[in-house]
Amino acid sequence: MKDIIMTTVQLDLSFDQIKRLVDRLPRREKAELVRYLDDQTLFTEMRRVRRELKSLPITHSELDAEVNAANKARAARARRP
C-alpha cells in the first residue's frame, strides 16, 4: 500500500491568469464557481451589515428592506451567465 503525501502549494496568479483558467473550465464547473463566489460575496456583505448594525439602531422594517435588497441583488447575480 502506498502512502499519500499531501503538499500545500501557493500560487501568485494575476487576475488575467485566473480568468484564462476559468475560461478552460467546463460549463458545470463554471456554474459551481459562480455559486461559490456569490456565496462569498453574500457572506462578506452580511458581515458588513452586521458590523454596521452593532453601532446603528435599526427598525425591523429597515432590516427587512436590507435583507430583501440583498436577496434581489443575489438573485440578479445568479441570473447572469
Image (tube, rainbow, N blue to C red):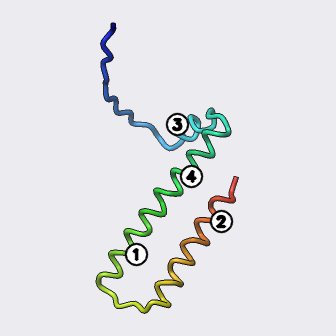
Badge 2: residue crowd in 10 Å (few <14, some 14–19, many ≥20): few
- Going by the numbered disc 3, the residue's amino acid type is Gln
Q: Tell me which label, 2 or 4, sits earlier in the chain.
A: 4
Dots 2, 3 in contact, CB < 8 A = no
Q: Tell me which label, 4 or 3, sits earlier in the chain.
A: 3
In percent of width and height, residue 12 lies at: 39, 36
Dots 4, 1 in contact, CB < 8 A = no
Label 1 element class: helix
Image quarter in which the N terminus is found: top left
Q: CA distance from mark 2 to mark 4?
A: 12 Å
Residue bearing mark 4? 35
Q: Tell me which label, 2 or 1, sits earlier in the chain.
A: 1
Residue bearing mark 1? 49
Using the image, determine if residue 45 lies above or below residue 8: below
Label of residue 17 in the image: 3
Residue bearing mark 2? 76
